[in-house]
Amino acid sequence: MKKTTGTFWLNATVFIAGAGMMTVELVASRLIARFLGSSLYTWTGVMGVILAGMSIGNYIGGRMADSAVNLRRRISTMFFACAAACIAILWLNAWAGSAVWLMALNWPLRILIHMTWAFLLPATVLGTISPMVAKLAIERSPQTGRAIGTLYAWNAVGSIVGTLATGFYLTAWMGSVRIVVCMAFLLAILGLLYGVTRSPSPAGEQAA
């Protein structure tokens, strides 16, 4: 029962991380639209910067997982960092949108710099979560391939749910700013849960 609970917890974590990543990507296109409009250039900038952030975050997250003395606490810390980075989007985006020096640049470069300034940080921080959770999953399961495959699957399902929910429902119901705030709040709750709950198994506690 404890093993099942622990597996569910890890799968739920990467599910929410995946949903959060896609929510940030869709909201990014909405937040920059009032400054840069919506075009092939803006969508290219959004996708490129988010993917770059995910790649950097995955790399950093793997190193953080290997060097962590208390992995659960480190995951908790990074979830709080994710929440702060999401809130920072609102200020960073407004700053980039009003930066006079950016307006003098050619259009593709302006979009790329704007996107990098406002959204690379949250994408990178969110990207650190999955490798650390994957290490917990590997340490708890003798079936490494199945554990990693299941995490990848739940992360992908979370991405799909986040995309559909944000695009079809949440944006019209809440608006982009409220989505960002609510996502930050949800990530902070996850950070709190990882910080205060104990590992569901002795092996997991040792790994933490």
Image: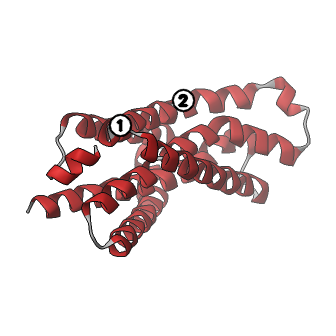
Q: Which scheme is used to colour this image of the protein? A: secondary structure
Image position of 145 (left or right of 203):
right
Q: Is residue 142 above or below residue 180?
A: below
Give the SS element for disc 1: loop
Image position of 141 (left or right of 130):
left
Q: Residues within 10 Å of mark 1 (few under 14, many from 20)?
A: few
Q: Which mark is residue 69?
A: 1
Q: Residue 155's image quarter? A: bottom left
Quarter holding the C terminus?
top left
Q: Nearer the viewer, residue 28 or 58?
A: 58
**Residue 131, how many percent across, how many down?**
45, 54
Q: Please give the name of the residue rendered at 37% of the width and 65% of the height, measured from the top-left corner.
A: 151
Q: Mark 2 near mark 1, Cβ–Cβ under 8 Å?
A: no
Q: Residue 187's image quarter? A: top left
Q: Nearer the viewer, residue 9 or 189?
A: 9
Q: Please give the name of the residue rendered at 23% of the width and 46% of the height, measured from the top-left corner.
A: 206
Q: Please give the name of the residue rendered at 59% of the width and 26% of the height, measured from the top-left corner.
A: 91
Residue type, label 2: Ala
Q: Which mark is residue 88?
A: 2
**Residue 30, how many percent across, how many down?**
60, 47
Q: Is residue 100 above or below residue 82?
A: above
Q: Please give the name of the residue rendered at 68% of the width and 49% of the height, measured from the top-left corner.
A: 49
